[in-house]
Amino acid sequence: MTRRIRIALFYGVLTVVGLFMLLPFLWSLSTSLKPDDEIIALPIKWLPSSITFEHYWSAFTTVPFARHFANSMLLAVAGVVTNLMLGSLAGYAFARLPFRGSRVLFRLLLGSMMVPAVVTLVPSFIIVRSMPLVGGNDLTGQGGVGLLNTYWAVILPGAVGAFSVFMMRQFFLALPKDLGEAARVDGCPEFRIFWKIYLPLCRPALATLAVFTFVAGWNGFLWPLIVLNDPDMNTIQMSLAAFSFNKQTDYGPLMAGSIVAMAPTLLLFAFAQRYLTRGLAFTGSGLQ
Amino acid sequence: MTRTLAGPPAVGRASPGHAKQRRSRMSRHQARAGVLFATPPMVLFLIFTVLPVAGALGLSFTSYDVFTPPQWTGLQNYARLLEDATFFTTLKNILLYCAMFVPVMIAASLLLAVALNSRLPAMSVFRTIYYIPVVTSPVAAATVWTWMLNSHYGPINEILGFFGIPGPAWVGDSSTAMVSIVLVTLWQGVGSNMLIYLAGLQNIPTHLYEAAALDGAGRWATFAHVTWPQLRLTTLFVTTLSLIGAFQLFDQAYVMTKGGPGNSTLTPVYQIYETAFNRLQMGYASAQAFTLFLIIVAVTVINMRINRSDET
């Protein structure tokens, strides 16, 4: 009997923690659907008495939220594509095609994962701004604004994370070495071996990496805040932060905007959670 | 990994000369392909990671406003830093934040991991729920939490009131603003560390638990003498990650409090952001960033020492 009570108590505690984790989603959803007078009401109304979508409408009409949503989507998807492509190419080279200096380069890559992002913030901005021959710049990178306020300012610096290369390398190392041997002896080009034999076996790793990079790209805030100043180029996170700064008490549209800004990664998580949790466990055990 | 450019692989030892030759031609061929594969990503890596790291130190010795070329000022930025009261405020704030955030983070994520490691049904459901905040946009989550912590109309104070606890003003009061940020970042981050701990728990050999059970060890003794020591590396990993992340706190401070009230939640990264991109003092911001980097390295090394001395 006492064991049964203990188990019930255990589930009770887990459920309370779970409600705490879910409360922000439930509360923002509820607020976003409430009529105005019920948002600021005492005592608190937990659920709307009638559902309205006006706050979503006003979130999308007071700021170019749709445009910012599209910007974020484009940047996040571009980040996924480049990281999968370049990460697996470099990962394969480091795992299976050793070349002069590849070990040193790989160590450098690993070491860079330890460098806090804040260190590179200012110099990266200057590099993006000083790209030669773009954005009005001359050959020495002076005179214009370089890649600032273009999608490239976010895409290029994030195109291949050290983590992407590291993760793909680990995965290629785990695949049997002699898979490509026969094709290699037959004179098959290395890229075909990579593309036709090894890459298809990497689907789980690629899926994990895709989810990871999408989440990171979609949620990224500080870097886009620095390099994308043109209002048309803003990401949805910047848009939401500006909105919450300018209209602090406009809770209805603010919560509607938050729901929209949270939705894509949550939906992705709902569909691909096994890849995410697997990848995270991999990072944890990979460093032991 | 062991194969080098020049040396033929050991398997080719018994085969005749021309096979050996073909082998080495093939590995040269592979090396060329490797260079080809690795060049595009590595060029980007050099431009956007290696170059900025090197540049960060160099810039910190200059005065640079983006519009005129940088001027060498030697150690001036660092001298200024020593007299910058705001910089010390941000350091004090972030240390306070770390002191609250990291221990609670370790305790909470380990506790949840141990709980969810039990063999009862539905554990994966809870694991999923606890992980959801990790993938949630920090900016949106901070926006929602600011509203949740609203002292009059927010649900948190309503719930506290139900238990007879008078709710504080949270982000509106300089004494609780940082606690609010701790709360939000814990909510957001606990799920990922919980997963790392779960992976660590699953790596503990079961025979250790069997031995402990044979010795008649109770639940607490087993935890103290088997689980905790076995998770030493996991704990080191989690504390290191948490510390590096915590020292770079920005999103939540920017969205929830704008560094206020009265600079009580101004963080180093926030100050670096303002110095560089609002006041356009790139050189001084680099000195701030580099100093913060050194502090992070120092704290990480101390943290490793502490964890290593636990070993004995």
Image (cartoon, coloured by chain):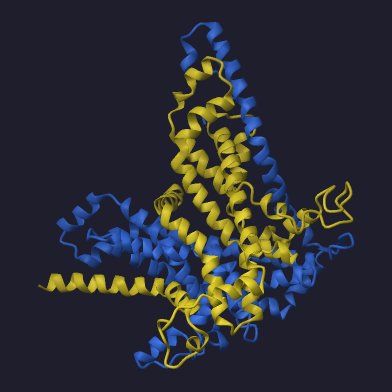
Chain colours: A yellow, B blue
State the residue in front, B257 or B309.
B257
* Number of on-image labels: 0
- Left or right of A170? Residue B5 is right
Residue plotted at (48% across, 8% down): B15
Residue plotted at (87% across, 53% down): A136
Image height check: is B300 above or below A41?
A: above
Farthest-out residue, left: A1
Image quadrant occupied by the N terminus of chain A: bottom left
- Left or right of A13? Residue B159 is right
Q: Position of residue A4 (x, y in %)?
A: 14, 70
Residue plotted at (82% across, 69% down): B76
Residue plotted at (55% across, 48% down): A163
Q: Splitting the image into 4 quarters, where does residue A122 fall? A: bottom right
Image height check: is B120 above or below A17?
A: above
Residue B312 in view in this figure: no
Image height check: is A205 above or below A198?
A: below
- Left or right of A287? Residue B250 is right
Residue B257 in view in this figure: yes
Q: Position of residue B158 (x, y in %)?
A: 41, 88
Q: Splitting the image into 4 quarters, where does residue B249 fall? A: bottom right
State the residue in front, B238 or A52.
A52
Q: Position of residue B173 (x, y in %)?
A: 56, 89
Q: Position of residue B123 (x, y in %)?
A: 28, 61
- Left or right of B254? Residue A23 is left
